[in-house]
Image (tube, rainbow, N blue to C red):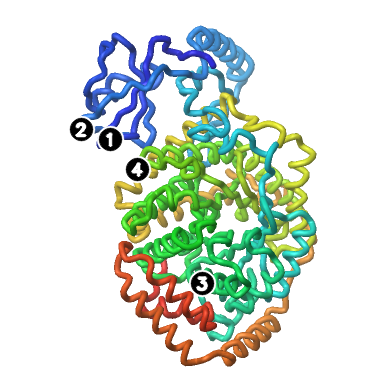
Amino acid sequence: MIKGLFEKAELIKLTGKSANKFIGVHYINSWYDDSPGMATVRDIAEKYQPGKGLLVPLTGWKETKEQAEVENLGEVVTMADENSVNKVREMEEEWQKNYTEKYEKKPGFKIPESHTESGISLKPVYTPSDVADIDYSEIGMPGSYPYTRGLYPLTYQYQRWMTQQIHGYARAEDTRKRTEKLTKEGMKGFVGAVLFIVPDLASAYGYDPDDEAAKGMVGLSGASVNTEEDIRIICDGYDLSKTRVGFSTKITCLPMLAIYLVYAERQGYKPNQLIGQSQNRRKIAWLGQNMRDHPPKDQLKLQVELIKYCVENVPRWNHTNLCGYVAGENCASPAQEMAFMLSEAIELIECGIKASIKPDDMIPRFSAQMHMGMDFFEEICKLRAFRKMWAKTMKERFGCEKAASQQFRIHVHTGGINLTAQQPLNNITRTTLQVLASVLGGTQSIHTSSYDEAISLPSEDAATTSLRVNQIILHESGMAKVCDPLGGSYYVEWLTERLEREAWKIVDEIESRGGYTRCMETGWLWNLLDQRIKTWRQEVDQGERVIVGVNKYRQEEAMEVPEFTVDQEEIERLAIERIKKWKQSRDQSEVKRTLKGIEEAVRRYESVEQAGGVMPALIDAAEARCTLGEMTDVFFQVYGQAYPC
């Protein structure tokens, strides 16, 4: 390691009410005279600025007269020493002369302004002087706090990333065939198989196939999954103690989990043996996909209900998926995506504490579905910066001692918004870049979108090609040989720090406005996304944002790619037939009794402090063979229905 730019310097940390907001550097014998004492945040802010002393705001800037204790944390280790930085600055001056001579004197040439998707202005070249003020402890080593460079000492040399392809279409039988095909072609988890199923539109909205509101939606964009029988067809024959099972549900997470638990119990598995995940991301689905749901405060209560039940009964289950993907699909910048995810997590953890859940018990089972866009380096830095933000928040704000609480496991979903119906084979190049960025950023798991998804459901050929993208990068590129190979890059380290800073600003803004749920209620979060969507559309229409094959390099003749289709009417007919038989085979008095039990439990659940009573009622109903739609309907009877816009 290289010793600090300020050879006689000490790192200080501000504690007290403004704790964890700032890290700074002061000169020994310059201000405190070797006697750490008391100072206001504003005093320090006025005296020490970046590059002079050093004050780096970590979660945004707050001018305050509150007292903050100063704690000596030891010597600073930065990315470059003073002599090296001076030499670099001489080189930069020489580069500037060359640039001026070669380019600026040419008539009509002006270096184009550029910035990242998060609006961070960029220079054409980066040097050690750009990272001289970054304390190396903020970067560290793989497997060491704050986990910027990765969660573990080794990454893909020891364990490759999981190819977790989300899939599902038509009926449970059809989806089962696709699962078996993908597994044969190489889809697998860390230990056993992966069954990550997308329910169809009807199931996602909480309708059974025989509901009039489901007409035209059954079997589209996913599989019709409404009963224990559907789950049995998908899951039978798998060792559920080693198979990662998940249903990409939005508003139906609680009843879907109840049905799965009942199915597993009938197969001889106890809840504490099961592995998998619930999405539990209803608020971002409500916001970003304009889905029907309950008012945001009721959504929050139901999220906490699921967390509490899983922590106490299904400890290997990832109870909550912090979904930046939906935000990204709505044009959120990387900084906004990070801030949305962390702000929701903070709110859920604080509510979990109110529900008598210890942070170290709930936090290790948060998981992520992060969006992977096309700004290659910023997307890499996003994963690095978010790991650091998460680790700091869990350790410093919530006092977590478990490493698993500080280590944020990331699943990446390559961007659907980047796929084009025009020249669809170009999408293979796009997803390859996104998988590569995900790997360079240190993800644990990847879903790779198929090249034909802008046209139709993924065909078998397209889904297999998505797996091949991952396999070629893993086995042929050499990418898996080194941990965090871009670590230490002047540009990457500078951008990681800047992106973190931008994300903290948004986190602070959300908190100042009353928190994540409150910002949904007021429409503030939606307005951010709406503005981004409008800007994106304008840039594409005006040619400022080039999309190959769409607004540049078009082809006169369309590239033909066969559409993968299903006979929706026939699928719907069969699904209705099946669920009617299911409903006729039950003890109707038990169905009525248990649905009434759900209603009573939901009505009693008035605040997060009372969490824990709804899931047992749902399991009771699932044992009585109640359907997904029937159980979901009870919640709408009690809480009502709301849309974000």
Q: Is residue 323 visible?
A: yes
Amino acid type, mark 4: Asp
Where is residue 236 shown, x and y percent of the image? 69, 71
Q: Is residue 628 left or right of residue 309?
A: right
The quarter of the image holding the N terminus is top right
Q: Reading the chain from its start, which is encountered first: label 2 or label 1? A: 1
Q: Reading the chain from its start, which is encountered first: label 4 or label 3? A: 3
Q: Are marks 4 and 1 in contact (CB under 8 Å)?
A: no
State the residue position of label 4.
Answer: 508
Q: Are marks 4 and 2 in contact (CB under 8 Å)?
A: no
Mark 2 or 3: the one toward you: 3
Mark 4 or 2: the one toward you: 2
State the residue position of label 1.
Answer: 18
Mark 4 or 1: the one toward you: 1
Amino acid type, mark 1: Ser
Using the numbered discs, state the Cα–Cα distance from disc 4 to disc 2 in whole angstroms: 18 Å
Q: Nearer the viewer, residue 435 or 69?
A: 69
Where is residue 481 shown, x and y percent of the image? 72, 33
State the residue position of label 2.
Answer: 66
Q: Secondary structure at mark 1?
A: loop
Name the residue rendered at 41%, 17% in the picture.
Answer: 75
Amino acid type, mark 2: Glu
